[in-house]
Amino acid sequence: MNSSSEPQPERRFGLLQATALNMSNMLGAGPFITIPALMATLGGPQSMIGWGVALIVALADGLVWSELGAALKKSGGSYVYLREGYGREKWGRFMGFLFIWQFILSGPLELGTAYIGVAQYLQPVWPQSSEFTRLCAGAGIGLLVIFMLYRRIESIGRLMVGLWAGVLLAMGFVIVTGAMHFDAKLAFDLPEDAWAFDVAKWAALGAAARIGIYDYLGYYDICFIGDEVKQPGRVIPRAVMLSLVLVALIYLAVNLSIIGVVPWREMVTAEGVSKPVVTMMMAKIYGSDFAQLFTVLVLWTMLACAFAMLLGYSRIPYAAARDGSFFRVFGRLHPRLGFPHVSLLVIGLIAAASTFVKLQTLIDVMLTTRIVVQFGGQIGALVMLRRLQPEMERPFRMWLYPLPALLALGGWLFLLFTTEKYLLAYGALALLAGGGVFLLWSRVTKKWPFAEASAPREMS
């Protein structure tokens, strides 16, 4: 139990700040760094159907997050939902532990993709630098984000809206520029076998959808700071679904704008998947000087993405520690500023270090380790809560239940089973290791599933 004298988070995030948080996370790095990789999956503009598949999965899954976030109004997001859905002292304890275990592996990797994006877009403004130097600069941005978040939540809300405005400005300029110079022949330059699907193409569609899902990740970010949201029963579902719809429209416009100016074949050469395509687009239209200037605004969006992501993710180990399911030190709030400073520092520093891993590896490993426990597990938690706690107050109820839950589960399984086998093996080993650590920890602390066996010896 927490002492009543400990500082508690304040509910200061309204719908505007919550939507800004989600959208900044989703928009900051995604389309600007993944369009070349997306085009490479199916070999042309038809790869965008993978982005459409990802949208369907995200919308269905957004309804899962909306109901759980509105009913369980606490910081920690998935950890809280798994713990409550499967039973706090038994299977919920196990699922909550597994989630934190995989999150320590996957959360900083997702954040690290934004820092890789920074390194990627530093190339045109700092051409004389080496790749390693730019990666070091990306990691330095990670340290800057930690510093920016080391403050009270109300000032963070104002800063979040300011960063969001820069993101929308960058996206809006790309869309308007693309519309003014759109070339349909470039945008729809399909190869001859574009729609000839075989087993390999279905696997490639899964790869395209995983990239699309990566672009959408963050639609649930507000759920991780539930303790700091005003009227969470109304704000969380609206922020989740509103951010998904708005970002879907922005992504469609941005993707078409870029491939309507920059030929997709220039993006997918052996070295092209890491090219700063937005800078290429601006250079083709306005020249290299303006392109370099606009790149600064792109870097702003990367910063906003990292800011939003680290804000939400730093609350996950904090929530688990406050609940007694993770190291106690992660549950500490800053005595004067009232935020989980230990969790912020640990997650932020690991994320900065992950800047030096390849982008595609980060995306695939991150999703592989998350799908089973977090996304699939939450769907099960929703069903369990509906069955076991029908009287629970639910300010928002999933539309057409259980169809969206089943659709989301099918989508996640498709993404999982079209992943490279060695990555599936990595994810399985990571979860098995987590299960082993859980059993060892439970044995030492004499908690479930070993609590009952130890009780008679304690009484004798």
Image: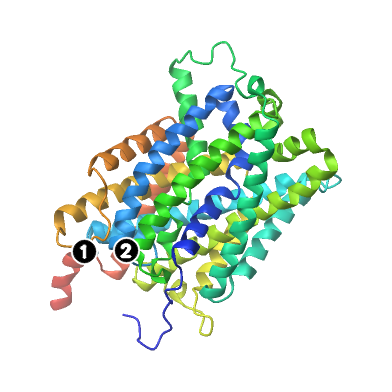
The image quadrant that residue 408 belongs to is top left
Quadrant where the N terminus sits is: bottom left
Q: Viewed as shown, does residue 295 lie left or right of 440?
A: right
Nearer to the camera, 178 or 327: 178
Residue ID for mark 1: 393
Residue at far front of view: 180
Compare marks 2 and 1 and give the one earlier in the sequence. Answer: 2
In this rendering, does residue 362 appear at all?
yes
The image shows residue 173, relative to residue 73, as above or below, that is above
Q: Check disc 2 and report its element: helix, strand or loop.
A: helix
The image shows residue 325, relative to residue 257, as above or below, that is below
Residue at image point 57% right, 37% down: 253
Q: Position of residue 274 (x, y in %)?
A: 68, 37
Quadrant where the C terminus sits is: bottom left
How far apart, in angstroms, are the residues tagged by discs 2 and 1? 10 Å
The image shows residue 451, relative to residue 193, as above or below, that is below
Q: Position of residue 16 (x, y in %)?
A: 48, 62
Q: How many marks?
A: 2
Nearer to the camera, 31 or 253: 253
Residue ID for mark 2: 233
The image shows residue 262, relative to residue 143, as above or below, that is above
Amino acid on which the number 2 mark rests in the picture: Gly
- The answer to whether the residues at label 2 and label 1 have Cβ atoms under 8 Å apart is yes
Residue at image point 71% right, 48% down: 119
| Residue 257, numbered label | none
Amino acid on which the number 1 mark rests in the picture: Glu
